[in-house]
């Protein structure tokens, strides 16, 4: 994973040549793909009546209580670790003094001012959704890589932690909403570096047009919606970034056609800002909008906030250190983060013979499970296959705290545990 302003946590299904979700999960390594039965049952946020005793930790999400047991299970169809469960109730996007919340509010402001409060806002929808909501409802093909166990957190074979806010499009349409913004935490299994974290935040925008809105224009519905979408998002980018250079790139998403990505020129680089497009008719038809057209967009809030607030590492968003949290003010977009100090990283290498089911995402899950946010980067530095056909990987793990110096003993102990778990959980042979 290169640093090249990698916004993989950003667009989901776009073309494989960009730093997109697809690209991020390219076949660099052997990949174990989990095939899931694609049920049509909707998941709800209710506690399952499975006879389990309630456990100590329970969260309130979207007004519903969720126990650890509802999310983390010792079952082969479950791949949610405790470290992810602990993020479920954090709601960074609902904190008005946090960069993610400040950015959300600035985007709300733009929509309220330009569309006289017409957009309904949702920021409390439950992140536990059905496979149907997350994938089928937005026409993600049955064999799409994003459905794999390697890329998505499955609670059970029919329930996932949403991997994009598009998971809510269909239900909101069915409920009769025609203009809406959905903000929420989304979850993707991923590698480890300064711009990737398995939980991040997205905002989805959606607008439906009725025939009389485009008929007078002389354009067909699709062109009318595409023009409107581009104007709306160019205005949003100017609202956030000021007078910037922008360009539109053709893209691919299963749920929109045509599809685009917006790039802006920032600090001498073209940077992908969002994915969007004209909604597939099938989605509208399936959800009660027969003669309409619509547009949709999805943007990654961390990605934008890192640039707008000068935040160098994605882990900082999760820091409770006052030296981070106290630097931001409700309603203020112009603030630039001042790094409080930089502690040295410590590098540890480990080599092992991989097996068929080995994936880098699985390795990263083990590393995060042991080291949490002390893991800064996991990088493949050597890869070879011997005459017998056995493949060896050497990974370099960078440990660094954002908040303090780590001791040698502490790091050695982390590395010892990582080695132990890599061996037992991933079933590889250490070298
Ligand atoms: N869901 C897409 C993603 O996660 C973004 C998107 C939303 C694209 C809506 C088009 C329309 O990358």
Image: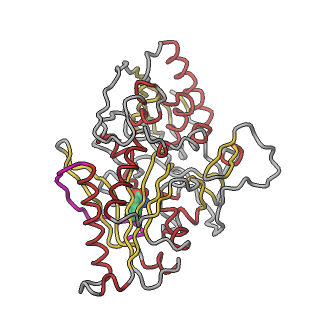
Q: In this rendering, would 152 be left or right of 4?
A: right
- Residue 429 to residue 5: above or below: above
**Residue 345: horizontal and vertical position, in percent?**
38, 21
Is 68 placed above or below 116 here? Answer: above
Left or right: residue 220 compared with residue 346: left
Does the magenta portion include 264? no
> Residue 347 at what x, y percent from top left?
40, 22
- Classify residue 261 by image quadrant: bottom left
Q: Looking at the image, which is closer to me, 407 or 404?
A: 404
Q: Where's residue 243, x and y in %?
A: 17, 51
Q: Is residue 420 left or right of residue 376?
A: right
Viewer-closest of 31 and 126: 126
Q: Residue at x 19, y 41 (%)?
A: 267
Tell me, yes or no, if residue 163 can be seen here: yes
Q: Is residue 400 visible?
A: no
The residue sitting at the right extreme is: 51
Assign the N terminus to one quadrant of the image.
top left
Residue at 70 percent of width and 45 percent of height: 67
Q: Nearer the viewer, residue 373 or 102?
A: 102
Rendered residue at 29%/42% (across/down)? 308
Task: For ligand 1, give the image quadrant.
Answer: bottom left
Q: Is residue 218 left or right of residue 186?
A: left
Vertical placement of residue 8 versus 118, above or below = above
> What colouring style does the render use?
secondary structure
Q: Magenta span covers which residues?
A: 241-256
Residue 266 placement (x, y as % from top left) = 20, 45
Q: How many marks?
A: 0
């Amino acid at each position: 994973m290169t640093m090249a302003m990698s916004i993989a946590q950003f667009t989901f299904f776009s073309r494989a040549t960009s730093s997109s979700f697809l690209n991020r999960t390219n076949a660099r390594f052997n990949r174990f793909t989990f095939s899931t039965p694609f049920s049509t049952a909707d998941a709800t946020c209710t506690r399952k009546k499975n006879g389990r005793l309630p456990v100590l930790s329970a969260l309130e999400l979207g007004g519903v209580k969720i126990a650890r047991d509802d999310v983390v299970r010792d079952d082969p169809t479950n791949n949610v670790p405790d470290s992810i469960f602990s993020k479920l109730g954090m709601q960074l996007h609902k904190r008005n003094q946090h960069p993610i919340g400040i950015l959300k509010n600035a985007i709300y402001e733009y929509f309220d001012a330009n569309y006289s409060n017409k957009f309904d806002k949702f920021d409390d929808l439950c992140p536990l959704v059905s496979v149907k909501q997350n994938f089928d409802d937005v026409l993600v093909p049955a064999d799409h890589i994003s459905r794999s166990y390697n890329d998505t957190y499955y609670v059970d074979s029919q329930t996932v932690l949403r991997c994009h806010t598009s998971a809510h499009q269909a239900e909101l349409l069915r409920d009769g909403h025609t203009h809406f913004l959905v903000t929420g935490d989304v979850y993707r299994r991923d590698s480890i570096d300064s711009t990737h974290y398995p939980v991040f935040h997205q905002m989805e925008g959606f607008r439906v047009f009725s025939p009389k809105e485009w008929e007078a224009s002389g354009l067909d519905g699709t062109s009318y919606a595409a023009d409107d979408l581009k104007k709306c998002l160019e205005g949003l980018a100017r609202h956030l970034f000021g007078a910037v250079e922008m360009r539109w790139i053709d893209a691919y998403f299963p749920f929109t056609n045509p599809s685009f990505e917006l790039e802006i020129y920032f600090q001498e680089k073209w940077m992908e800002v969002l994915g969007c497009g004209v909604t597939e008719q099938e989605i509208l038809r399936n959800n009660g909008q027969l003669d309409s057209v619509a547009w949709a967009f999805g943007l990654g809030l961390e990605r934008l906030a890192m640039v707008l607030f000068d935040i160098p590492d994605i882990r900082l968003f999760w820091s409770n250190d006052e030296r981070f949290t106290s630097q931001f003010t409700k309603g203020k977009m112009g603030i630039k983060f001042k790094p409080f100090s930089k502690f040295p990283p410590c590098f540890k290498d480990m080599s092992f013979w991989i097996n068929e089911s080995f994936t880098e995402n699985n390795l990263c899950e083990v590393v995060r499970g042991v080291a949490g946010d002390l893991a800064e980067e996991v990088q493949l530095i050597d890869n070879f296959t011997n005459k017998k056909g056995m493949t060896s990987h050497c990974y370099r793990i960078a440990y660094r705290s954002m908040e303090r110096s780590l001791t040698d003993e502490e790091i050695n102990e982390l590395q010892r545990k990582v080695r132990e778990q890599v061996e037992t959980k991933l079933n590889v042979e250490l070298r």
